[in-house]
Image (cartoon, helix red, strand yellow):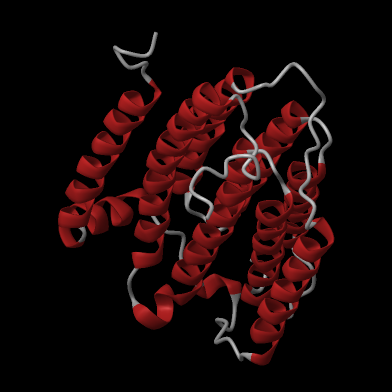
């Protein structure tokens, strides 16, 4: 395990720092469009960590679904819901309380992680790369019923979103 | 490979940052962005457990979990943005503290 700092670990920490700084940018940026751009950087960092964990499939899905589709939806919603009349305060009154609560949550999580002994494999060679075929086998044999249900759920949710966003006949 | 603890700590920090965004932002779309950050932290955790635990447990269910989380998140974003757009049309605001119609 302790075979010095490997290149993978260096890349992991670079990606982690980029991801966390971008995430802080998402929640503190003063301009909502900047927040959305920071969000793209944070998603790219998460996709990079998926690559380090040898799951290329999830990294690809992450970039395709989050990095493009979700971000485009969010940018459209930001542009559609911009109130032009007056400058908007971006943070609520309870901001110090929220920051304190988040820090408390972080302390609890890190305390739990440190207090637990994890059974890390002895060498990094013990960790097998997860192949695309193994993921496909798992999804389409063991998890086929949840897969179908989630597909139906997705189409119902998208239909519902269209219903919600489309104007009523008696609106005007 | 980075140690499992390091990945978990990074994900915990990402989750806490997302929680901070949910608790401090006013704009509904920005709150949604923060929720997405939290979801990302959780699915990254799932993948880390699956990859590091497959020797011990012999399956990769965590990766399937992460896949399903991404699908659910896409559905959730579409629905929530539909609600935000509808709210903006009715109340001319996307700030959650100004939408208090159901508040007693």
Residue positioned most to the top? A172
Total marks shown come to 0
Residue A27 drawn at (x, y percent): 75, 46
Q: Is residue B92 above or below residue A11?
A: above
Residue A60 drawn at (x, y percent): 48, 39
| Residue A162 visible here | yes
Question: For the point 35% across and 52% down, which residue is it?
Answer: B68
In the picture, the quarter occupied by the N terminus of chain A is bottom right
Q: Is residue B96 above or below residue A14?
A: above
Residue A107 drawn at (x, y percent): 75, 78
Question: For the point 35% across and 58% down, which residue is it?
Answer: B64
Q: Nearer the viewer, residue A21 or B57?
A: A21
- Residue B50 located left or right of residue A84: left
- Residue B67 located left or right of residue A29: left
Q: Is residue B66 above or below residue B13?
A: above
Question: For the point 33% across and 24% down, which residue is it?
Answer: A162
- Residue A7 located left or right of residue B59: right
Q: Quadrant of residue A2?
A: bottom right
Question: For the point 55% across and 81% down, which residue is it?
Answer: A121
In the picture, the quarter occupied by the C terminus of chain A is top left
Q: Nearer the viewer, residue A160 or A26?
A: A160
Q: Nearer the viewer, residue A138 or A83?
A: A83
Q: Nearer the viewer, residue A12 or A45?
A: A45
| Residue A1 visible here | no
Q: Is residue B48 above or below residue B85?
A: below
Residue A95 drawn at (x, y percent): 80, 56
């Amino acid at each position: 395990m302790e075979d010095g700092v490997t290149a993978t670990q260096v890349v992991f920490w670079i990606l982690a720092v980029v991801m966390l700084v971008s995430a802080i940018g998402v929640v503190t940026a003063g301009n909502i469009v900047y927040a959305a751009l920071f969000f793209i950087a944070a998603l790219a960092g998460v996709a990079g960590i998926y690559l380090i964990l040898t799951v290329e499939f999830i990294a690809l899905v992450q970039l395709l679904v989050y990095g493009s589709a979700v971000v485009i939806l969010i940018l459209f919603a930001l542009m559609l819901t911009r109130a032009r009349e007056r400058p908007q305060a971006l943070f609520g009154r309870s901001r110090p309380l929220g920051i304190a609560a988040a820090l408390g949550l972080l302390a609890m999580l890190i305390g739990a992680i440190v207090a637990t002994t994890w059974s890390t494999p002895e060498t990094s060679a013990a960790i097998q790369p997860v192949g695309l075929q193994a993921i496909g086998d798992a999804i389409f044999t063991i998890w086929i019923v949840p897969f179908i249900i989630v597909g139906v759920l997705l189409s119902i949710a998208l239909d519902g979103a269209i219903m919600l966003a489309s104007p009523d006949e008696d609106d005007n | 490979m980075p140690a499992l603890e390091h990945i978990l700590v990074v994900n915990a920090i990402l989750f806490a940052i997302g929680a901070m965004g949910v608790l401090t932002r006013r704009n509904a779309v920005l709150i949604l962005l923060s929720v997405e950050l939290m979801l990302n932290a959780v699915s990254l955790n799932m993948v880390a457990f699956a990859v590091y635990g497959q020797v011990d447990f012999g399956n990769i269910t965590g990766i399937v979990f992460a896949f399903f989380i991404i699908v659910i998140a896409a559905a959730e974003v579409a629905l929530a943005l539909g609600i935000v757009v509808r709210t903006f049309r009715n109340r001319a605001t996307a700030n959650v503290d100004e939408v208090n119609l159901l508040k007693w």
